[in-house]
Image: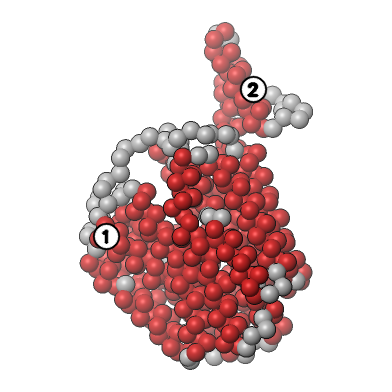
Amino acid sequence: MPRPRGATWRDAAGTRASSVRRCVTSDVNRPTLWWYCGAVTSARFDERQVLPLAMFFGSFSWSFVYISLPFHIQRISTSDAAGTLTWTGWIMGITPLATVLTAPLWGRWAERGNPRTLNAMVQVTQGLAFLGTAAARTLIELFLCRIVLGVTGAASTFAFVSAGRSDDPRDVRRQVAAIQSGMTIGQVIGPLVGAIAAARLGFRASFVLGAAILFGCGALVRWGLPDRNDGAASGASAARPNWRDVFAVAGIVLGGSTQIFFLTSILPRVLSDLGVADDRTLEVGGLIIFASAVAAALGSVLASRLADLLPERRLISGLLVLSSIFVVALAPVRNVWAYGALRFLQVLCIAPVFPLAVARIAQSGGVAIGVVNSARIGAAFVGPVLATTLLAWSAPGALYASLALIGLACVPLARDASPRRA
């Protein structure tokens, strides 16, 4: 059935669904009925791709801009080296901090309201904040734009709420997995493309391009998803959280994620110390962040396979120790490619910790998962601020030693938590 001129694909799908009902009531021949059912199924299949596609482009846009942000800060800064490092940490870290503080409010609105509308609104608002980032001429202005980005919330929250409103639990799992895959792929591709774009087009032009991508995401969500302004899907009640385990998992996630998020904010200083020429720092930095993102994606994929081979407590503890060893090994390195290889191995070790730890409390309800997810987002604030502050006032070895100690401090939490129920 061709789509009527001027109508959306959702309108066409609704027309086909009405046709199916007429077919059933009028007892038409079976081949025609199956043809219409196939048309409706095809339209529904298209609808299910909208959220993963939107989250891919949204994650891509954020990674696209994030990689060049510390270099842009360094260029417009009028402070000395130590002051610039401190500003870099706060400008990059304030966004996740604001997201952590406002996440409960956005989550409550998403549960009670229309997640499609909220998702589209957040994407557009973040695009406007990206334009503000491009227009900013001082570090204060840049800092305020980053606060706005954090206050507008995380689009992934609304995506997961939308996915959770399906009546079929298997459909929910498929949608959540597809959304996570889209975000991971965007995080892998974004840094490398963003670094090349910033080097070729300039920082401000790359920020504008990132804003355009977010505007497109908002349009895709607004006109690509059906309007479902109903309450959350009913389901089995979650088990009462064991808050001791929840906070232990949150501590593990906070410490492990800090070892992931620390690097980008200090990358210009690290590359300079490694002898990379100023005109090559952006592209070389993009390659290192790209390699780290690939390691993170591989580590997440390997998590379930590793869990089948080793007891969960020993596995998480071992990964934390290995990651801490690789972090310390970064300190004496003086070659950029050796540094990149060690960073790849370090992220490969720490990346499986998040899904393995979260699996312990996955049946404890949305509040418990929200606490743990807040710890992950909070690490995006702690990592840059800790790294830039220590590197501004001490030797690099002190930074890497501190990060290693944070990872080792999480080992008792991994060993003491209650075993996960089958």
For residue 286, above or below residue 124: below
**Circle 1: is it few (<14), some (14-19), or many (20+) Cα within 10 Å?**
many
Say which quadrant the N terminus sits in. Answer: top right
Residue 145 seen by the camera? yes
Q: Are marks 2 and 1 in contact (CB under 8 Å)?
A: no
Q: Is residue 27 left or right of residue 141?
A: left
Q: Is residue 115 left or right of residue 145?
A: left
Residue at position x 70%, y 61% from top? 131
Structural distance between the alpha carbons of marks 2 and 1 = 50 Å
Amino acid under disc 2? Thr
Amino acid under disc 1? Asp
> What is the total number of numbered labels drawn onto the structure image?
2
Task: Give x and y (percent) for residue 203.
Answer: 72, 71
Of pointers 2 and 1, the one earlier in the residue sequence: 2
Residue highlighted by disc 1? 245
Kindly state the secondary structure of the residue where label 1 is placed.
helix
Task: Give x and y (percent) for residue 182.
Answer: 55, 53
Residue highlighted by disc 2? 15
Kindly state the secondary structure of the residue where label 2 is placed.
helix
Place residue 206 in its image quadrant.
bottom right
**Circle 2: is it few (<14), some (14-19), or many (20+) Cα within 10 Å?**
some
For residue 283, above or below residue 96: below
Task: Give x and y (percent) for residue 123.
Answer: 62, 51
Place residue 26 in its image quadrant.
top right
Nearer-the-camera pick, 59 or 293: 59
Nearer-the-camera pick, 45 or 135: 135
For residue 373, above or below residue 11: below
